[in-house]
Amino acid sequence: MKHLSTKVTSNAHGQDSSYFLGWEEYEKNPYDEIKNPNGIIQMGLAENQLCFDLIETWLAKNPDAAGLKKDGHSIFKELALFQDYHGLPEFKKALAEFMEEIRGNRVTFDPRKIVLAAGSTSANETLMFCLAEPGDAFLLPTPYYPGFDRDLKWRTGAEIVPIHCSSSNGFQITESALQQAYQQAQKLDLKVKGVLVTNPSNPLGTMLTRKELNLLVDFITSKNIHLISDEIYSGTVFGFEHFVSVMDVLKDKKLENSEVSKRVHVVYSLSKDLGLPGFRVGAIYSNDEMVVSAATKMSSFGLVSSQTQYLLSALLSDKKFTSTYLDENQKRLKIRQKQLVSGLEAAGVTCLKSNAGLFCWVDMRHLLDTNTFEAELELWKKIVYEVKLNISPGSSCHCTEPGWFRVCFANMSEDTLDLAMERLKEYVESTDSRRVISKSSHERIKSLRKRTVSNWVFRVSWTDRVPDER
Amino acid sequence: MDLLSRKATCNSHGQDSSYFLGWEEYEKNPYDVIKNPQGLIQMGLAENQLCFDLLESWLANNPDAANFKRDGQSIFRELALFQDYHGLSSFKNALADFMSENRGNRVSFDSNNLVLTAGATSANETLMFCLANPGDAFLLPTPYYPGFDRDLKWRTGVEIVPIQCSSTNGFRITKLALEEAYEQAKKLNLNVKGILITNPSNPLGTTTTQTELNILFDFISKNKNIHLVSDEIYSGTVFNSSEFMSVMEIIKKKQLENTDVFNRVHIVYSLSKDLGLPGFRVGAIYSNNKDVISAATKMSSFGLVSSQTQYLLSALLSDKKFTKNYLRENQKRLKNRQRKLVSGLEAMGIGCLKSNAGLFCWVDMRHLLSSKTFEAEIELWKKIVYEVKLNISPGSSCHCEEPGWFRVCFANMSEETLNLALKRLKKFVDDGNSKRSCQNNENQRQKSSRKKTMSTVSNWVFRLSFQDREAEER
């Protein structure tokens, strides 16, 4: 560790964090239907594996796109040399249109305001570099994606101050929570540069309501700060209501060309909607020319492979494909979510009512020995070691209430999900009998809210894992 | 502009820098053999366009690689989901082998010591984040690649202190220059964290000599908290591979494997120059320092290589028949092309630094300057851009201390285009010669002023003009 930067040395430890166990256990003993039917089922990876067939069919019918050809002619040389940080124009155009389609064509996206990045991991970090100085803070509603601790803070020096959300109102953002977070930042002597929300939310799987969005836009207007809306899950909305983007709200409030609109930025990626995390395709959308200009230059540090840009420009330019895909994707996600929700219900476990995402926010508070994070960790270990399911404990997402877990449903087959639900049901039933006996003795113990391991240790355990697990 | 960070706003100007002109002029009026034969010829882009035919025929013979297939079976899903920052092992293995091959197999590379990044741009920045804190300094020999000002300093807060090299000894690094740079850093109150060299050099096109490498190794052996980063992005462009000596070879030769120096020497690589694939964003950090590898691996999250690209290239580079032939052909063609440029320039009385690598020559146009100043260099440069219609890179953009040197690329155009460029330049020189012999009589009575003046626009403005251009122009 000698002679290295403080960024490196501060992150050296945490390898022995207990939260690591879930991942390690899975890798030691991964479930396989044939080869390892008793292995651990991975339910901690927010991947979308439900629609690969649609993409594979398209690829088979359109061999030029992957084959680096256009109208039968090789454009290999052109692509090999293409490193312009403004991005492949036909790709940005197709991406802008795809983003519009996801929002029911209610809003328009100008390709010139798009900056491509190597995944939204890169997009989010780049936005921090553009909007915040080291020591400045962004407010984030809890619970939030654990990777933000690394993506937004590590190399940028920015700070995160949580906006505490609670189960009492379905974890929605309230005005008082916003104000409290702002004041907390001031108490800590941190200059607040903006608010960052993930909409639809990871890990909640819910869309921000219009009320919340209006609240946020009003808030950033009054405080003269930025709003970043990470809409990476925008294409996974499967509820009856359509997705309402912050761009919709700006339009409805007639703020499209206003000064406020310059402080609203959207982050997007094809990792969740299209299930292509390996291709590293992310984007920043901003109405502020200076942000677009600076972010474009910064994208030099994480450009999207021209080979990939070309393939996806062809894919996304095919409107027949995109329209079918978005439709099917929603359908399949909805069915799969229902399967998880009813499977959990059968085990006496409920979820936060959700209408988007690749996971459910599951309420296991009633399974805790005590209303504490220690108990949450204990339960989590049991679920990993005994039930053999790797799910994500709420404390890893900075949730302020113990007992909530994020459980993914789109990264496995239907049969595997059934098996996972069966295992959980068995476990709950076997412990139910045990709990009836011990519950009365615990009722007298006050709940402690202290976490057993510090945030940074936990954060670091996540950072040592597969990079973009969300 | 309190709403945006200083990093974002300090870069907003510079758009009106005069150095921008070359690029703008080219884009307004690009040469095309059929559509625009009077247009500007681009000689400022260090691209390798000489061996695409080899790559294209390999692709035609191996369609699976680009089509997400392995042995005829689709592995699309696997690749689509693959985002492990440890990288595709088949690719890293093939890359490590390729790097060894590039060094005549005189050293071997362990794929576990390799971190993949989105280009060398990302690799260099990541190494800075790992090795230095804001305010620390790295020493770089001049002239150097203009992009380093952005890549090494911008978001990292690291400083660059130049090791001044001069034409008196072929721009070689001397012990004296190195020590002076170190002292200068101390004077500026900067903590020196390392030295970064580009070997072979951009813009010089020369391989670092054994003498220079010895000087560098002696220095870091004595100064135990200093790292040595060797950007070997041009390693496959050495015309004769026996002339290239990598820092890893020095370690082997001097048997430094069990010393602490072993942990302080790092290599940066990329496929942008050797294979001519800048668009694919493939870079790498190689280090024997486990802590650096571990940290850089996590940081690579911010710039991973597309799995689609990793797979294609793992297939390509695993084909040893291909790589062997490619490396040999590439060297041959580059050598021939460089010869054409050098002899063409000679024929008009222009010399180059004797080079044995790279995609460019370091051209001596000092005798064409009206005065030994950077203003005169810019004047000459503007003439070459506007009148001769060649976009070449002035030495001041590379922080060269002496006016009159220019980097001229030769591998990014056809032979015919290169001939045309030389024709145009010859005409300009011949015309200028006649004008000059008239003026010379007058000027002989005036003392030549040897005052070195600073370039007309500050470094950062110049740097920005490069930044606003094609991202990876080296």
Image: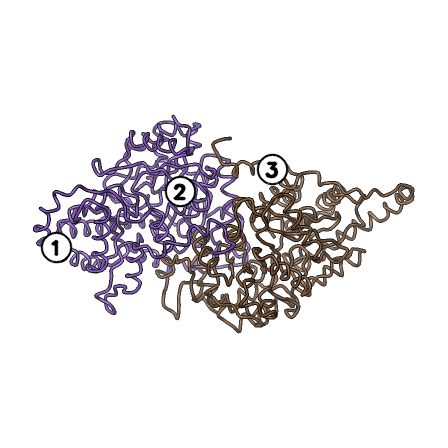
Chain colours: A purple, B brown
Q: Residue furthest bottom?
A: B321
Camera-near label (2 vs 1) is 1
Judge left or right: residue A202 versus residue A265: left
Residue tagged 1: A431
Q: Are marks 2 and 1 in contact (CB under 8 Å)?
A: no
User: Which amino acid is tagged 1?
Assistant: Thr
The picture places residue A343, in percent across and down from the top left corner, at 16, 52
Q: Residues within 10 Å of mark 3 (few under 14, many from 20)?
A: some
Real-space Cα separation, disc 1 to disc 3, in angstroms:
68 Å
Q: Would you call the spot at circle 1 few (<14 residues within 10 Å), some (14-19), or many (20 or more)? A: few
Marks 1, 3: nearer the viewer = 1
Task: Tell me the tag on residue B15.
Answer: 3
Task: Inspect this view and state whether residue B34 appears.
Answer: no
- Distance in Å between CA atoms under marks 2 and 1: 43 Å
In this rendering, is residue B291 above or below B325? above
Provide residue B409's location: percent of width, then percent of height: 67, 55
**Amino acid at pointer 3:** Gln
Q: Disc 3 to disc 2, how far (Cα)?
A: 27 Å
User: At numbered mark 1, what does the secondary structure look like: helix, strand or loop?
Assistant: helix
Say above or below: B24 vs B230: above
Pointer 3 and pointer 2 on the same chain = no
Q: Say left or right for B308 vs B226.
A: left
Residue at screen point 74% across, 48% down: B402
Please provide percent x and percent y for residue A239: 24, 42
- The kind of secondary structure element at disc 2 is strand
The residue at which mark 2 appears reads as A267
Depth check: A142 or A336 in front?
A: A142
User: Which of these two is toward me, B215 or B332?
Assistant: B215
Name which residue lies at 13% across and 46% down.
Answer: A442
* Percent coordinates x, y for residue B220 in the rendering: 61, 59
